[in-house]
Amino acid sequence: METRVRGIVTREMRFKETSKILTLYTQDLGRISVMARGAYNPKSDLIANTQIFSHNAYRLHKGRSFYYINQADVVDSFYSIREDMDRMLYGSYMLELINISTVEEDRNEKLYFLLLKGLRVLSDAKEDFLKLIISYELKYISFLGYRPSLNTCILCNERNPKIIGFSIARGGVICSECRGMESHCEFMDIGLWKAMNSLLYTPLDEVFPIDISEDTMFKLHTIMVKYILDRIERKQFNSLSILDAIKRNGGI
Ligand SMILES: [Zn+2]
């Protein structure tokens, strides 16, 4: 039986001489494993539509352990992500997030469309990558079911609280009154709170004009990485370790 799906290549692994095992994130099936036979053969029809980041329309059939490709057409190659080191590293982070935090064949259309839009905006972005990434992180974790609570204190439910912290464990802001009751709390002032709020609710392609200082962005990104790792029960992101190493060595 043939299945037609649209999907994004989120991981590729060489298999034997000329084949590839792909991870696809698809609209209808969520994350699936696909065997692309002969994809490394220079004459293969599958070269373009088995590239990492590419968005393709596939006709698949299901085998015992994998799906197999009957036919595939490129929808968008996202070539400009692969040709720029910054874009590629941040794009790899988007792919890693989806690879390690989703369950095989667990459909989540919101995540699919977020990834697709994230890659589209990233492929056109010239700078300000971190702003885009924080907005992506906030939306991503929300669509996984863990939207941070930003409008009331997570402990006392006080509305319009004087915010002084963010609790990773509880997933929300802590007011000045409750600060003493929470042992582990990330510092968060009104500037950080405003930036977090606007990056959560502004569409990805509209975040660039938002005025946020570099210092605020680094702090927010640090909080988001800790929060996401806590929720998906992981220790680190490989893609971010590479990015950090490059930044430490004086940039790209
Ligand atoms: Zn409180």
Image (cartoon, helix red, strand yellow):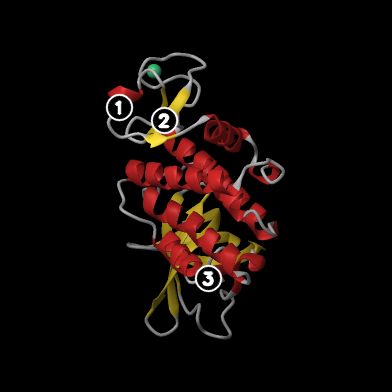
- Residue 160 screen position, x and y as percent: 52, 16
Q: Write the residue at 32% across / 34% down.
A: 169
Taking the image as shown, residue 173 lies to the left or right of residue 112, namely left
- What is the secondary structure assignment of the residue under circle 3? loop
- Residue under label 2: 165
Quarter holding the C terminus?
bottom right
Q: Residues within 10 Å of mark 1 (few under 14, many from 20)?
A: some
Residue 182 shows which numbered tag? Answer: 1
Does residue 8 appear in the picture of this structure? Answer: yes
Of residues 58 and 236, the one drawn nearer to the viewer in this rendering: 236
- Residue 198 screen position, x and y as percent: 61, 34
Taking the image as shown, residue 212 lies to the left or right of residue 28, namely right
Does residue 104 appear in the picture of this structure? Answer: no
- Residue 120 screen position, x and y as percent: 65, 54
Taking the image as shown, residue 124 lies to the left or right of residue 222, namely right
Q: Residues within 10 Å of mark 3 (few under 14, many from 20)?
A: few
Mark 2 / mark 3, whichever is N-terminal: 2
- Residue under label 3: 250
User: Label 1 amino acid?
Assistant: Glu
User: Label 3 amino acid?
Assistant: Gly
